[in-house]
C-alpha cells in the first residue's frame, strides 16, 4: 500500500484529485489537508506517508515553505507542488530543496495519474512550460534518455549513464513513443526537440 498527502484549500478540487488518484493507481491511499498546520499534523500522526504534494497558495502559508519544512522534519517523505501556475523559477526552487515534482493544475486527469505513478516508480516529474497542458508529462528520467539519444548514445551507454538496465531503458522507450505519438527513436527525439521538451 502506498500513502500520499495532498494539501489544497479548495475542497472540490482536493477531493477530485484524491478520487482520481485512488482510482487510477492501484494500492494508493490519498490523505488530504486544507492548510500547512493540518498537513504537518497529519505527517506527525501518520508515518506511512510516502509523498506530499501541496498547492503553492495556502491559507496559512505557501506550499514551497511547507515542503521545505517536510524535507527537514520528515526526510523520507518525497515532496512536490501541484499548483495553478507552475514556472521554471518555482521548479528550480522545488528542485533545490530536494523536491521531486512541480505539476500544473491544468493537467488532464490521465496526465496527473501518470505523473504521480511515475513519482512512485522513482522518477522526478516537472511538468511546466510546453508540457503543462499535455496529457502525459515526460519524467526527468525519460527526458534524460531522449537527451542522451539525441547525442547518438545507444541504449547500452544510456543504461550505464543512468545506472539502470538496458531492458529498463527499452521499457522507457515504449512509454516515450506512446507519450509523444511516435514509433521510433529518431522521430521521438525530433518531436521532443520540436516541442522544447529537451
Image (cartoon, helix red, strand yellow):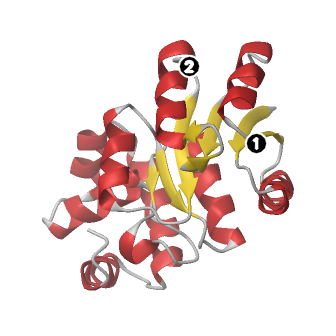
7 or 20: nearer the eye?
7
Depth check, mark 2 against mark 1: the one in front is 1
Q: What is the crowding at mark 1: few (fewer than 14 residues within 10 Å), some, or many (at least 20)? A: some
Q: What is the crowding at mark 2: few (fewer than 14 residues within 10 Å), some, or many (at least 20)? A: few
From what the image shows, is residue 22 above or below residue 66? Answer: below
From what the image shows, is residue 125 above or below residue 63? Answer: below
Image-based side of 174 in relation to 6, left or right:
left
Dot 1 corresponds to which residue? 34
Dot 2 corresponds to which residue? 76
State the image coordinates of residue 67 (x, y, percent, origin top left): 52, 33
Image-based side of 117 in relation to 175, left or right:
right
Q: Earlier in the sequence, mark 2 or mark 1?
A: 1
Q: Residue furthest left?
A: 151
State the image coordinates of residue 2 (x, y, percent, origin top left): 76, 34
State the image coordinates of residue 75 (x, y, percent, origin top left): 51, 17
**Which quarter of the rendered picture does the N terminus lie within?**
top right
64 or 173: nearer the eye?
64
Q: Residue at left 86%, top 57%? A: 19
Q: Residue 5: which numbered mark, if any?
A: none
115 or 175: nearer the eye?
115
User: Which secondary structure lies at badge 1?
Assistant: loop
From what the image shows, is residue 37 above or below residue 95? Answer: above
Image-based side of 74 in relation to 192, left or right:
right
State the image coordinates of residue 35 (x, y, percent, origin top left): 70, 38
User: Which secondary structure lies at badge 2?
Assistant: loop
Q: CA distance from mark 2 to mark 1?
A: 22 Å
Q: Residue at left 54%, top 36%? A: 79
**Which quarter of the rendered picture does the C terminus lie within?**
bottom left
Amino acid at each position: 500500500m502506498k500513502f500520499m498527502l495532498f494539501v489544497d484549500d479548495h475542497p472540490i478540487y482536493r477531493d477530485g484529485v484524491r478520487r482520481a488518484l485512488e482510482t487510477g493507481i492501484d494500492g494508493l491511499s490519498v490523505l488530504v489537508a486544507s492548510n500547512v498546520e493540518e498537513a504537518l499534523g497529519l505527517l506527525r500522526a501518520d508515518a506511512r506517508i510516502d509523498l506530499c504534494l501541496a498547492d503553492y497558495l495556502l491559507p496559512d502559508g505557501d506550499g514551497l515553505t511547507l515542503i521545505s519544512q517536510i524535507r527537514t522534519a520528515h526526510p523520507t517523505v518525497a515532496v512536490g507542488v501541484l499548483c495553478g501556475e507552475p514556472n521554471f523559477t518555482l521548479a528550480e526552487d522545488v528542485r533545490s530543496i530536494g523536491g521531486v515534482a512541480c505539476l500544473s493544475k491544468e493537467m488532464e486527469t490521465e496526465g496527473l495519474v501518470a505523473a504521480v505513478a511515475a513519482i512512485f516508480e522513482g522518477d522526478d516529474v516537472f511538468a511546466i512550460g510546453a508540457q503543462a497542458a499535455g496529457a502525459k508529462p515526460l519524467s526527468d528520467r525519460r527526458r534524460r534518455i531522449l537527451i542522451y539519444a539525441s547525442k547518438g548514445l545507444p541504449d547500452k551507454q544510456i543504461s550505464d549513464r543512468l545506472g539502470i538496465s538496458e531492458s529498463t531503458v527499452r521499457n522507457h522507450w515504449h512509454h516515450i513513443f506512446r507519450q509523444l505519438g511516435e514509433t521510433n527513436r529518431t522521430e521521438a527525439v525530433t518531436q521532443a526537440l520540436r516541442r522544447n521538451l529537451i
